[in-house]
């Protein structure tokens, strides 16, 4: 069984699964992937494999069609986000595919909480100043009593809300599946973007789909309170980055913590790179050893099951 793996976190821990590979007679191809492979690279390599564990690569109709003409029997999307997958192509080409849901809620919520605290107390910026030999006394803001808007109430958003509730924050949640959910103490469910002007923090934890591209845009920034702090641990295109840049320049948005971007890696000439109150991740919020091993094993079990089912007819 030839298996292609293009998910960077999983590629970094393949040695943990040597016994699994031997037991299932799996020959692994592990290309050097910084973030994703290109369509042309995928077209040249996917057809040579029975299975493909996908990262954030462009898993397009063109790629799956090439795979089907070759050996490809099944695929698994490593992780929870599936906006890069053409599921219609898989259905049309009879290529079984799934993802690994509900794997990273706690891990990404932890990172989001870290960003919120960092933006509130400007710890990242104090750290940078200390390393330069300075001794800053930056006045931050308290979290208790502040309002945080969370877009998305799935595994990540709900895990984050539990953490923030303990800190005494007021939580406004935006998720179409929960619009009619009964409000709780310090936790309210609204239709987007109702009451967004109340938010001191805006945290994005939802999946990307055709209906929410650039949902945080200039119209939204025109309605938020001055000094908003933004955290995005979901997908870059949920924010219109040009509008974010404008809002940062106008001080409508005070600071931002971004783990994801419209273009990844973040371009060297991006204005965001040089903004003094922007902090960054490398699309890495889910990457803990514990979660990676758990998710990778699940992905392996699923892909092997798919392929064996195909081979057994």
Image (cartoon, helix red, strand yellow):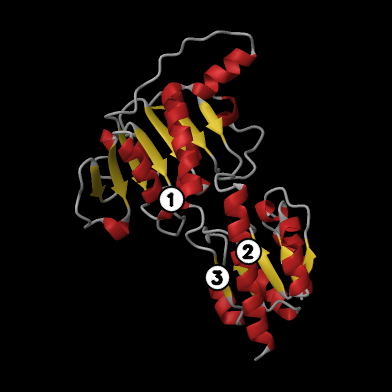
Residue depicted at x 61% and y 54%: 292
Q: Pinpoint residue 275: horizontal percent, then vertical percent.
A: 54, 24
The residue at which mark 3 appears reads as 98
Q: Are marks 1 and 2 in contact (CB under 8 Å)?
A: no
Q: Is residue 220 above or below residue 137?
A: below
Mark 2 lies on a secondary structure that is: helix
In the picture shown, does residue 290 fall above or below 203? Answer: below
- Where is residue 212? Give x, y as percent: 41, 53
Can residue 65 be seen at all in this image of the molecule?
yes
Q: Is residue 179 left or right of residue 264?
A: left
Asked if the residue at tag 2 contacts the one at tag 3, i.e. Cβ–Cβ closer than 8 Å, the answer is no
Judging by the rendered image, the residue that carries numbered circle 1 is 156
Q: Which residue is labeled 2 in the image? A: 297
Does label 1 or label 2 sit earlier along the sequence? Answer: 1
Foreground of the two, 33 or 107? 107
Q: Quadrant of residue 23?
A: bottom right
The residues tagged by marks 3 and 2 sit, at their Cα atoms, a distance apart of 14 Å
Q: Residue at x 31, y 49 (%)?
A: 174
Q: Are marks 1 and 3 in contact (CB under 8 Å)?
A: no
The span from disc 1 to disc 3 (Cα, nearest Å) is 19 Å
Q: Where does the N terminus fall, quadrant-wise?
A: bottom right
CA gap, disc 1 and disc 2: 21 Å
Q: Which is more N-terminal, label 2 or label 3? A: 3
Q: Quadrant of the C terminus?
A: bottom right
In the rendered view, does 118 fall on the left or right side of 2?
left
Taking the spot 42% from the left edge, 35% from the top edge, the residue there is 230
Q: Which residue is the extreme one toward the bottom?
A: 313
Query: In front: 146, or 275?
Result: 146
Question: Residue at the location (65% across, 58% down)?
Answer: 57
Q: Is residue 34 left or right of residue 127?
A: right
Asked which secondary structure carries label 1, the reply is helix
């Amino acid at each position: 069984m030839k298996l292609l793996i293009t998910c960077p976190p999983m590629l970094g821990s393949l040695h943990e699964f040597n016994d699994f590979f031997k037991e299932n007679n799996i020959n692994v191809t592990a290309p050097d992937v910084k973030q994703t492979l290109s369509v042309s690279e995928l077209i040249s390599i996917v057809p040579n494999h029975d299975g493909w564990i996908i990262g954030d690569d462009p898993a397009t109709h063109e790629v799956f069609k090439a795979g089907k003409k070759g050996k490809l029997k099944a695929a698994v999307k490593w992780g929870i986000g599936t906006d890069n997958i053409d599921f219609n192509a898989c259905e049309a080409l009879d290529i079984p595919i799934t993802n690994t849901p509900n794997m990273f809620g706690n891990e990404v919520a932890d990172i989001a909480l870290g960003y919120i605290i960092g933006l509130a107390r400007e710890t990242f910026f104090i750290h940078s100043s200390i390393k330069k030999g300075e001794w800053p006394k930056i006045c931050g803001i308290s979290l208790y009593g502040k309002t945080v808007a969370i877009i998305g109430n799935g595994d990540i958003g709900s895990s984050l809300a539990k953490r923030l509730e303990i800190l005494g924050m007021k939580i406004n949640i935006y998720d179409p599946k929960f619009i009619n959910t009964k409000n709780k103490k310090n936790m309210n469910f609204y239709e987007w973007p109702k009451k967004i002007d109340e938010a001191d923090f805006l945290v994005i934890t939802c999946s990307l789909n055709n209906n929410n591209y650039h949902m945080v845009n200039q119209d939204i920034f025109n309605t938020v309170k001055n000094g908003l702090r933004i955290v995005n641990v979901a997908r870059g295109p949920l924010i219109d980055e040009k509008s974010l840049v404008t809002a940062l320049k106008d001080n409508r948005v005070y600071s931002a913590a971004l783990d994801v971007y419209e273009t990844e890696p973040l371009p060297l000439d991006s204005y965001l790179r040089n903004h003094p109150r922007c902090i960054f991740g490398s699309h890495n919020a889910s990457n803990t050893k514990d979660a990676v091993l758990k998710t990778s094993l699940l992905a392996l079990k699923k892909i092997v099951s798919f392929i064996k089912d195909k081979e057994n007819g």
